[in-house]
Image (tube, helix red, strand yellow):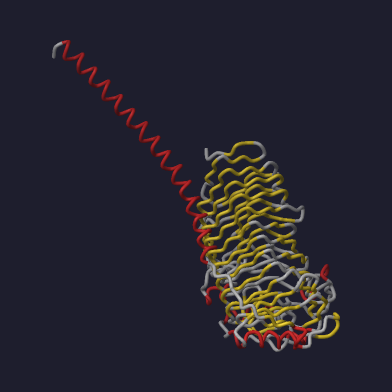
Amino acid sequence: MTVNNKSSLKVFLLILIGIMVFSCKNKTEDKAETSKDSEISESENAWKNADEIIENIKVPQFKDTVFNVRDFGAVADGETNNTEAFADAITACSESGGGKVLVPEGEYLTGPIHLKSNVNFHIEENTEILFTKDKKAYLPVVHTSYEGMEFMSYSPMIYAYKQKNIAVTGKGVFDGQADNENWWPWSGAERYGHTEGEPHQRDEHNLPRLSKMVEDGVAVEERIFGEGHQFRVPFFEPFECENVLIKDVKFVNAPFWVMHPTKSNNVTVDGVTVESHGPNNDGCNPEYSQNVHIKNCLFDTGDDCIAIKSGRDNDGRRVGISSENIVVEDCVMKDGHGGVVMGSEISGGVRNVYVRNCEMNSPNLDRAIRIKTNTRRGGTIENIYVKNLKVGQVKEAVLKINTHYAIYDNQEGEHMPVIRNIFLENVDVENGGEYGILIRGREESPVTGIHLTNVTIKKTETPLSIENADPIVFKNTSINGKQITNE
């Protein structure tokens, strides 16, 4: 080979190497851009899905016909029992094709209110409905649920069973009149008025007996608990209903869970205020329910503000309905065990939950976002999206995921939970309490797919405490002033 040929070869090789380096650089940049675009696309698609869910939810509409409860004998003196007058107005309204049952200004005492199809039960501003303290008024037993287990028991205060197009609206107040002398002592807690030796829900003839029936597969209609048993009632429970609206009303002094849509589809909770600090006073618990929109609400509760559920243990697996397509937006959470929670009655699974534009702030709010289950509950929890969340103060953690949850004894079983695809985006936290992120997964089933994007936790004692979880994907996330990376 001549010198000229060698020089030409050298130049050729240098050009070839340059082309290869440039190509590799472009491919790396393209891959990075593709990954970035993929993340943007994931977020955009998620919130498009949320918008589509809202758009497809059927909000009930009603005829203009008005049925004034006073025309059916209702008396607004706070002492006369109006159960029959309310029931007569609701029946007349439903049988005539629907409309509005109007409760004008005043104070009304009543027993349980049973809604029927095509009825909007509307309470005017400056109206207060007091629910009687007489437990016998909530009999005969109805098909209801307690902590994710179905049975026959006292009627919820406002109840609908297999009805379509129903609503509870207006700017009045529903007062359950529960306190340390009424309903709450049945919790068994001394601070809620229980006296040692008095019967309560955890006595052998109550929860243990019901749990055994569930374990043994006893038919629901044979699980009869009423007089002589100590189960507190939900405040508002639409059971197997379709097209449900709860708007503008206020709930106070609840015996148990406040709003409990069960096996229901197309549920809208709009502008509702919950101020109730009793035992298990969760604000809103969609269970086995789908296509739920919770917006513009204020929750100040004795337990979880919002807790999404799907049955407990064998009952959840028997029913086999997941809670899904749930959008929570523009809500304020004050006191409570958690802001938005999934579990612990979660055996049927939860998926496609969207939380955006909410504020959470209280020294008595334990966690912002929480998932709780164990190997008795099991369940698959997936596709949880949180965006534009402002947190002033929480006590324990901003995000807590616990697959070892145990408030009762013997919570270990053979049903391994699966938790995956949890996305937090644009989250601003002033004080995260004890932990920024607290995750307790299982070695046999680690928590996977956790993404934090544009998350700022200004103050927390322990930034990260993680067991049995895949590495979290951090993007522009800082805790205690320090940028968190995946390195």
The spot of residue 135 in percent (x, y) is: 78, 84
State the residue lying farthest toward the left.
Answer: 1
Q: Residue at x 83, y 67 (%)?
A: 191
Q: Is residue 221 above or below residue 331?
A: below
Please identify the quadrant where the N terminus is shown. Answer: top left
Q: Residue at x 72, y 78 (%)?
A: 102
Towards the viewer: 407 or 249: 249
User: In which quadrant of the rendered view does residue 330 lie?
Assistant: bottom right
User: In which quadrant of the rendered view does residue 285 lie?
Assistant: bottom right
The spot of residue 148 in percent (x, y) is: 62, 73
The spot of residue 17 in percent (x, y) is: 29, 25
Q: Is residue 240 above or below residue 34?
A: below
Towards the viewer: 79 or 347: 79
Q: Is residue 460 above or below residue 286?
A: above
State the residue lying farthest toward the front.
Answer: 64
User: In which quadrant of the rendered view does residue 88 lie?
Assistant: bottom right
| Image label count | 0
Q: Is residue 92 above or below residue 280?
A: below
The spot of residue 261 in percent (x, y) is: 62, 72
Towards the viewer: 280 or 216: 280
Can the viewer see residue 427 in this picture?
A: yes
State the residue lying farthest toward the top.
Answer: 3
Can the viewer see residue 228 in this picture?
A: no
